[in-house]
Image (cartoon, helix red, strand yellow):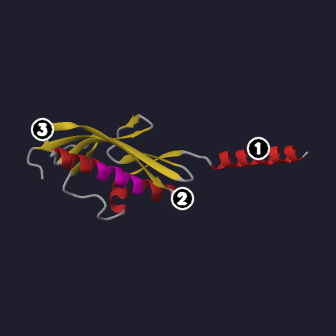
Amino acid sequence: MKKLWMFAALCAAFAASHAYARNTVDTYSVDVALQSEPGKVSDDIALYFAGQPHPAVKKTLGQFSTNKKTNAFGKSDEAACQHVFLSAVAELQEHARKEGGNAIINIKSNYKNELRESATEFTCGAGAMIAGVALVGDVVTLKGGK
């Protein structure tokens, strides 16, 4: 009988743990996120999201991707997603600096390898504990750029 109770308790615990597992995928504003934590994203590397016009490309230095995660515990999905988006953008900018570029163009969301092109929104997956953003973009040197 004791084993039956232990088995029942184990099953209840297992079922409860799955009730808290969630992965809500949503889109959020690029502009709002870029302004959410002033100073986190530098202005030395220009950012152009998919479809945004930019000066002519002088040199293409490669396509780079990033897949960032952050602790979402106790945060709203929007706050966690904005924070991790900024981390992903900062990582792309660091790639550009290392490669000698002055801009990242054609930035797209790539959440779970599903490309989404938008000049105004990014895709983020948020759960009870973790939020994640994946981006891909082309590091370039623009003519007349910074």
Specify whether residue 49 is painted magenta: no
Disc on the earlier residue, 3 or 1: 1
Q: CA distance from mark 3 to mark 1?
A: 59 Å
Q: Is residue 77 left or right of residue 133?
A: right
The answer to whether residue 1 is above or below residue 72 is: above
Q: CA distance from mark 2 to mark 1?
A: 25 Å
The answer to whether residue 132 is above or below residue 35 is: above
Q: What residue is shown with label 1?
A: 11
Disc on the earlier residue, 2 or 1: 1
- The count of marks equals 3
Q: Main secondary structure of the magenta part?
A: helix
Q: Quadrant of the N terminus?
A: top right
Q: Amino acid at mark 2?
A: Phe
| Residue under the image location 24 percent in, 58 percent down | 42
Q: Amino acid at mark 1?
A: Cys
Tag 2, which secondary structure? Answer: loop
Q: Which residues are magenta?
A: 83-91
At label 1, counting other C-alpha atoms closer than 10 Å, the crowd grade (few under 14, some 14-19, many 20 or more) is few
Q: Which mark is residue 73?
A: 2
The one nearer the camera, 13 or 125, is 13
Q: CA distance from mark 3 to mark 2?
A: 42 Å
Where residue 17 appears, as percent x and y from the top left, is 67, 48
The answer to whether residue 24 is above or below residue 44 is: above
Quadrant of the rendered image containing residue 87:
bottom left
Where residue 125 appears, as percent x and y from the top left, is 48, 46
| Residue under the image location 18 percent in, 44 percent down | 99
Q: Amino acid at mark 3?
A: Lys
Q: What residue is shown with label 3?
A: 59
Where residue 129 appears, as percent x and y from the top left, is 54, 53
Spot the residue most to the bottom.
38
